[in-house]
Image: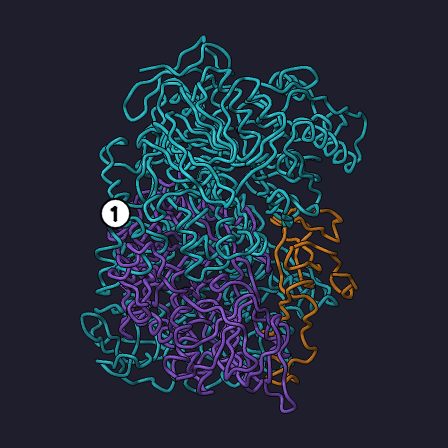
Chain colours: A purple, B orange, C cyan
Amino acid sequence: MRFGFINLLRQAFAGNEGWPEQWRSPEPKAAYDAVIVGAGGHGLATAYYMAKEHGLRNIAVVERGWLGGGNTGRNTTIIRSNYLWEESQGLYEHAMKLWEGLSQDFDYNVMYSPRGVMMLAHNIHDVQVFKRHVHANRLQGIDNEWLTTEQAKAFCPILNTDPRIRYPIIGAALQRRGGVARHDAVAWGYARAASALGVDIIQNCEVTAIRRGADGAVEALETSRGTIRTKKIGVVAAGHTSVVMGMAGVRMPLESYPLQALVSEPIKPIMPCVVMSNTIHAYMSQSDKGELVIGAGTDAYTSYSQTGGLHIASHTLDAICELFPVVRRMRMLRNWGGIVDVTPDRSPIIGKTPVPGLFVNCGWGTGGFKATPGSGHVFAHTVATGEPHPINAGFTLDRFRTGRLIDEAAAAAVAH
Amino acid sequence: MLLIRCPYCEMDRPELEFRYGGEAHVARPVNPMAESDESWAEFLYMRTNPKGLHAERWRHTSGCGRFFNAIRHTVTDRFVVTYKAGEPRPEVKP
Amino acid sequence: MTSFRTAQGGRIDRARTLRFTFDGQSYTGHPGDTLASALIANGVHLMGRSFKYHRPRGPIAAGAEEPNALVGVGRGGRYTPNLRATQVELYDGLVAESQNRWPSLAMDVGEVNDLVPAGVFASGFYYKTFMNPPSAWKDLYEPIIRRAAGLGKAPEQPDPDHYSHRYAFCDVLVVGAGAAGLSAALAAGRAGARVILADEQPDLGGSLLSDASATIDGLPAAEWAAKAAAELAGLANVTVLTRTQCFGAYAQNFFGLAQRLTDHMPVPDPKAARERLWKVRTREVVLATGAIERPLVFPENDRPGVMLASAARTYLNRFGAKPGARAVIFTACDSGYGAAVDLARGGVEIAAIVDMRSEANGPGIDAARAANLPVRTGAVVTGVKGRLRATGVEVGTIASNGLVNPAGQLSCDLVLMAGGWTPSVHLYSQMRGKVRFDAERQIYVPGDRASNEHSVGACGGSFGLADALAQGVAAGTAAAKACGKGATETAVPGVAGEILPRGGYQGAVPHHRDVRKVKAFVDFQNDVTAKDIKLAVREGFRSIEHVKRYTTTGMATDQGKTSNMNGLAIAAETMGKAIPEVGLTTFRPPYTPVTFGTFAGHSRGDLFDPIRRTPSHAWAQARGAAFEDVGMWKRAWYFPKPGETMHAAVERECKAVRASVGLFDASTLGKIEVVGPDAAEFMNRLYTNPWTKLEPGRCRYGLMLNEAGFVMDDGVIGRLAPDRFHVTTTTGGAPRVLAHMEDYLQTEFPELKVWLTSTTEQWAVIAVQGPKAREVIAPLVEGIDLSPAAMPHMSVRLGTICGVPTRLFRVSFTGELGFEINVPAEHGPAVWEAVWKAGEAHGMVPYGTETMHVLRAEKGYIIVGQETDGTVTPNDLGLDWAIGKAKPDFVGKRSLARPDMAKPDRKQLVGLMTSDAGVVLEEGAQITAEAAPVQGRPALGHVTSAYASPTLGRSIAMALVSGGRARIGETLYVPMPSGAIAVTVTEPIFFDKAGSRLDV
């Protein structure tokens, strides 16, 4: 059943008894043409585009827990495309274009809200770096503009632009098309649309082994719900990528870190945009529900614990209170952690692996949510055709051998 | 805030005194120029990143300044053992 | 207005009257009241509006679990939104206002949402509509939804208060000071353990303070609690923290506690911290966090006047506030009877006790019958009359087939819900304890012990008072013993007169009404009804996390304390599964919300981050210097004369350095002393350059790579002796470089005998640069021959200056004759002043970092971090000369041999000259081959540095350009929004290419 206001009313009058399941919960089949491991946003998007654009219908997504339960459901939902390197710009802008029509494309309101993402400059080095981004983005047709301190204040009135603070704000880069979306809806929207196209989404199905044939190519997945034969496996397991790839004997240039986020109690709107400060390590937006959504960098050590240290959250709030003094009396409602897989150059790996039939999409670090549609779209192409899409051609695993890195961390030290 | 035992100071100290140093026992090749691009990339970038017991390096930066190794469970963050740099990885039960 | 204050009893100080206002209306209360109890004593139940439907709401609870009665308290910057009226201690002059309503609490336009046909605003409705046209979400629907959502308002002024942090260590942390916690603290404290006892209430006692029937060791429960509190206060090894919520458990027995210090005071001492964050590391922890009573889910269970039975007892017994005049008690648990008996004794008429259970027996019902209270078993409440306040209930009877038949109405202004108790396992779960489902009682209780943890009393699933006391004593004793303390044993107190809270119910209560037309609330604040949860399950949301997120159950400011189990039960029933098969959502900190200010503590303003100042800071400040932030440093940026622009100041400073001499504070440079018999070999491995043959007394430009082959740092390095190097690093790179060196020294090259010491803070570095530099310093220096022959460029000498020992470097970052005078930092200001005095006759000017940048750019000297960005190799920078070709190895060498590291199209450092000499390029601007580049085509590179060069009288720029060295002489473009700027590619050196000015 299509969503929309008419059906909403019609169903409401019928006691909402007529809504069908948003996605099927099938038993796994013995074999599929391709299996995606991981039903987060990226994995579900991959399956959706494989079905929609490449006509693959006999495919499955297997998920250890519940769909959308990893970083998709834990992140702070920032969307932007103002990256530095051409490869990154291409990838994230591709995602941005898809975001702009995503709700309509799969008939699920993901509440994509391009309310603007503003990055604060606190010193001359920040200014140089951000202006470099502004210029690089402009050449690629990606909006990103430089704001004076006064313009930044006008765009976000609760910002503390007092020049006497410890790290005064001396300007900002603003991507107006940047913004936020409703994270859960992204996973659910892709799941619903993929399921409708015939994709089997199998939750509570943990991969325990990857079987390879005599030629080294993948043959099957062993799972907690039985063996699933397939010639193509796309691993989209975020923080658990090293674990899953290890089952195929592939070592990865990844480390998994806890990344914390927190929300305040809901309040009436005070925060019209997303503000990020890399120099003092914090970012904040306000959800449609009214919660201030706050995050920062990762904890200092690798971990799969999905929690983090109290001192990390404390330090994040120090910074938030410096930037936005009126929120000091706001209260932290909930603090949680995700597990992010970080590559040496802070750019993702999307492509083939040394194992025939095995593909990987990982390494999104702290900033994967924004890429969800684009990532799924190009990875679908890669798995379906066996070759990378031009947009992800540079994001190979092999770049760590050749040295052709895509170093967004070095370039900007901003990778949220 | 983890509590970490420095094997040199022989004291449990808070995480703030330490700096994490990544996976342990990733030895730099003795003759790097003799390494292939593949093996060099393995040394530079490939990491075990286990879900479970992890041998890792820490430095007691705000203490004795020494590097040491630890075995920590990456799901519970529990330290099983810490040991001095250069010592072999101890056999421990998960 | 009728007073609902009892004539006597309760823990309020009736001798004193406190005045307060709620929504502008004046009321009175007494010390000991909460805002909620004072309002109830004034007959006011309507305290808030719900999130989605804006339904009128009163408190259902008396403590931290309250979902409805959220208010804003205070004025100006001290205003705090979303506080639970049930937790706000009353003080004289308190100003509170309701939230999320307009124009008034009783007349809220938003309530129109409640009139929309039931089901339109069902769970997840917003995912299904508002999609077209694509821009409408952001421009039309979202603004409306955002305005309607949110609860309170943020303060509009900065917070005037301050906050503090404290670390603490103890043997036994006891969380919760009810019966279990008090007895645990007593047992551990008497045994001699260092104990911290924390409770969020102002008084110790927990539910004992609300208990009017039980006695402990012959004393009324509250009196026993007071006696225990007095004993604990007298134990030197026990720290009692009241008004302190233990909100989070972290790895290795580390706990976060938030203490409210002044919120209960009418006029707090401005010098006192408002709140304090305790960071407690404990060996053992006793969790005595109690249990929370569950509401029953029946139609209109949210009307003001409907509340938990335990809350009603608390209002009556603890606060002397009658929650109503005539009550219906709807119960599935024996605790409903206890409440009924207490209320009857307190003068509240009991219209009926409606017990869902077909058969009720035991001391509860016996006590009710003895008091002649009307009891109906096998019955349910199926609806509540009244809107702003309950006026009555509909009652039904449960037939043997499970269906409900209407059985009349009862008038009442108070409806109590007693659905049984949910153990507060939050902290246990945060400690990674795995809860276990008790199928018989249908509750989750702690399973195996988490690390050094003891869950006692109700949070452990033991709801009886005697059990709580016994478990508390046992846990306190065991915890103390685990810490080696066992001096004194504690006997278990004896209990009489308690009614055990047997029974309970979760899920939706059956009723006979049209389900489409009624709302039975599960999550009160977020307006989640039983229907919403059923809809979510119908739509395929089968994991409890999915149900929670789709319906928003448990996501309100109470985090589901009263709603999670009912929601879970309804979801499980709808799926036809047992509760444990559906899962349980994760408990996350904080247990109750904690202000941001508490976390931030003193880290505010200047204390947000330390400020590092150079020895000449005060001198520069006195001369009106502008400063820039570089890392934690404040560096003098330029020294404007009165009325002078930055541009003019920098031009003047540059010209003075080239013409005569300038004075610059270079103390921020990182400095590392590398010492030992293997120092040269260590330097050989850590820097690209060869060091073995560098003579003592000479200096060399050092280039450091990371192992991936990219430039990491640079600096001039002097060899003071065969076994001693004075290494300088970039300002920002100092800690990173030292850590990098230590890493290799300790873990890769432990065989080298080398010691590393950071000396950044020990040396003040006074740079004297310009043709007259030697003349300026010569009169001050002793023991060093400054003549060009004796002390050539790139040399270092030891001697004295102004009588102070110095390491005098002859180095230059300007291209002029230059010295960098290193003196012990404490002598820095005096030597600086002396050099300044000596230089004045030579026309010396002080200059800042901006002039330093211009002068070095004229000479083509790079700045790591400006010309480099972590992706740049020595070859890219034209620095191959700095690589010791004969060395078999150095950090980064192997990586430089990787396929991509030597490609001809790599970005290489070049100079750029604009065709219009007056145009200064923008740093960061892109460089293209065409004036009008095609969108999507990669740029050739970018401008790394650009200045107006006073020396050349024109603009100059440095850039990284793809294949740049082969493009020298070519015209390229810098496209700007106003049009492309044509540039000519040059070598990256603009002045004195031969370097003759250095050799003077």
- Relative depth, front residue between C231 and C652: C231
Residue identifier under label 1? C116
The quarter of the displayed image where residue C851 is located: bottom left
Q: Secondary structure at mark 1?
A: loop
- Relative depth, front residue between A407 and C217: C217
- Relative depth, front residue between C680 and A330: A330
Image x and y of residue C982, in percent = 23, 78
- Relative depth, front residue between C720 and C85: C85
Image height of A68 relative to C402, above or below: below
Q: Amino acid at mark 1?
A: Val
User: Count the marks: how many?
Assistant: 1
Q: Name which residue lies at 48% across and 31% down.
A: C354
Residue C416 seen anywhere in this rendered image of the structure: yes
Q: Residues within 10 Å of mark 1 (few under 14, many from 20)?
A: few
Task: Please identify the residue farthest to the bottom as the structure is shown.
Answer: A215
Image x and y of residue C861, in percent = 42, 69
Image height of C291 relative to C517, above or below: above
Residue C79 seen anywhere in this rendered image of the structure: no
Q: Quadrant of the N terminus of chain A?
A: bottom left
The quarter of the displayed image where residue C326 is located: top left
